[in-house]
Amino acid sequence: MHQTLRPVRWTFFVFGAFWGTWAVAAADVERSSHLSAGGLGVVLSASVGTGGVLAVGVGGLAGRWGARRLLASTLVPWGVACLAAATVGGRIGFLVVFALAMMLAGLVDMAMNTAAAAGLVGQPGRMVRFHALFNAGALAGAAATGGLVRSGLSWHWTWVVVGAGALALAVVVRGAAIPGAPSAGGGHATFLRSVREVRAQGLLLLAVAFAAAAVVEGGIDTWGVLYLRTQLAAGVLLGAGAYALGQAVAVSTRGMGGPLIGRLGPRRGLILGAATAAGGLVLEAGTGHAAVAAVGLLVAAGGISLCWPLVIASVAQASSPPQPVVPAQPGPDASSLPASPEPATALVGAFTGAGYMGWVVAPVIVGSVADAAGLAAGLFLLAGIAGATATALAVVPARRGPR
């Protein structure tokens, strides 16, 4: 059977639509659930944090189950949770299933990145273009949600589509030949093994910087549009439009500039992305004009989009043994399998966990600062984290561990 990554690509798109919807709907969820910025941050941190812990644990099944089974098995409960969050009534009921959907999203994130990394080892440029589909989905989700809210309809309809799409993808994934077969030894990438692999490869600083970039990315996704809509009284279309344009920049950057960005390497890519995000956040938080702040959000969202795919692709490549050059099969989905997925699984799992640690920290930090000093102060804090990350990577020399 011909191996294909097409279902994984569509998973990235649907997953992006999920987060694009959330970026625009955060203000509506905060208002309808009667939560403060800090309260919303606690709900997000608890659910995303639990998802990150589960992702590290469940990630060990990749070696035994293979990419196809793992991805299909995570899509089903996540799709059901999204449908439940879109249809359940009552404040408490919604918050429970909403937190469940956010938690299960961590498993899907881990599974789809593991599947992509297994099929694209040694191809960081393609991995960057691959992640452009996430941004395309975020653009579609943000635009659809903004249109629904502007028309007086419920944003929940977008999660109905996301949930149904996830369940349909689970069926497609089950029947597809996705690269990343189970290993003979059933390699189990435990959390401690993942951390040891990060240290052995000399990637500890990169992992910390990646977590910090995830703090900024999570903050932009949750608080960027919320600030425009609640503090600057910008209309939903301006807020959603700025975020959607930021995702459009990310799509074009990742899609058309994939080979060039791949040659940048993870370190320079993180420096460029974090520095750009810092500038955009300062612009958004430092002006009282909604249109100028929207430009800042656009710049910040586009800049931070460089970080995740470059790092995931690079750590997967760093842990994989050199492969013989094999002529490519015809067709856009042809990929060469690495000799063994366990080392890549260990590193991808560790960095996914580091990213989710960042996502956990972001809502609590920004939410608490916002409650105490306003959302602008929270955005300035995110800008400081982004600037410090870029500076540290530029100043501290890289260390390569044993191969």
Image (tube, rainbow, N blue to C red):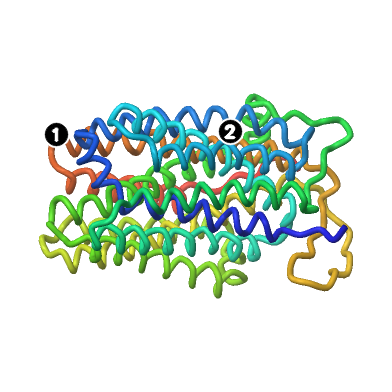
The picture quadrant where one finds residue 283 is: bottom left
User: In terms of secondary structure, where does tag 1 sit?
Assistant: helix
Q: Nearer the viewer, residue 154 or 281?
A: 154
- Residue 98 lies left or right of residue 36; in this view the side is right
At 45% from the left and 30% from the top, the residue drawn is: 49
- Residue hosting label 2: 55
- In the picture, measured across the screen, residue 393 lies left or right of residue 5, that is left
Residue 57 sits above or below residue 78 on the image: above
Q: Residue 207: image x %, image y %? A: 53, 40
Q: Position of residue 194 (x, y in %)?
A: 65, 32
- From the top left corner, tell me how far across and down residue 392 is, in percent: 42, 47
Q: Which dot, 1 or 2, sits closer to the camera?
A: 2
Question: Relative to 292, does residue 35 appear above or below in the rendering?
Answer: above
State the CA–CA distance, disc 1 to disc 2. Answer: 33 Å
Q: Residues within 10 Å of mark 1 (few under 14, many from 20)?
A: few
Tell me which residue sits at (23%, 48%) in the image. 380
Q: Residue at x 57, y 56 (%)?
A: 310
Q: Are marks 1 and 2 in contact (CB under 8 Å)?
A: no
Q: Mark 2: give few (<14), some (14-19) or many (20+) Cα within 10 Å.
A: many
SS at circle 2: helix
Q: Could you say which quadrant of the image residue 195 lies in?
A: top right
- Name the kind of residue labelled 1 in the image: Ala
**Closest to the observer: 341 or 209?**
341
Dot 1 or dot 2: first in sequence order is 2
Q: Quadrant of the C terminus?
A: top right
Q: Quadrant of the N terminus?
A: bottom right
Pinpoint residue 359: horizontal percent, then vertical percent: 42, 39
Compared across the picture, whether 390 is left or right of 375 comes to right
Judged left or right of residue 123, residue 106 is left
**Three-letter amino acid code at disc 2?**
Ala
Looking at the image, which residue is at 69% across and 36% down? 346
Q: Which residue is mark 1?
A: 372
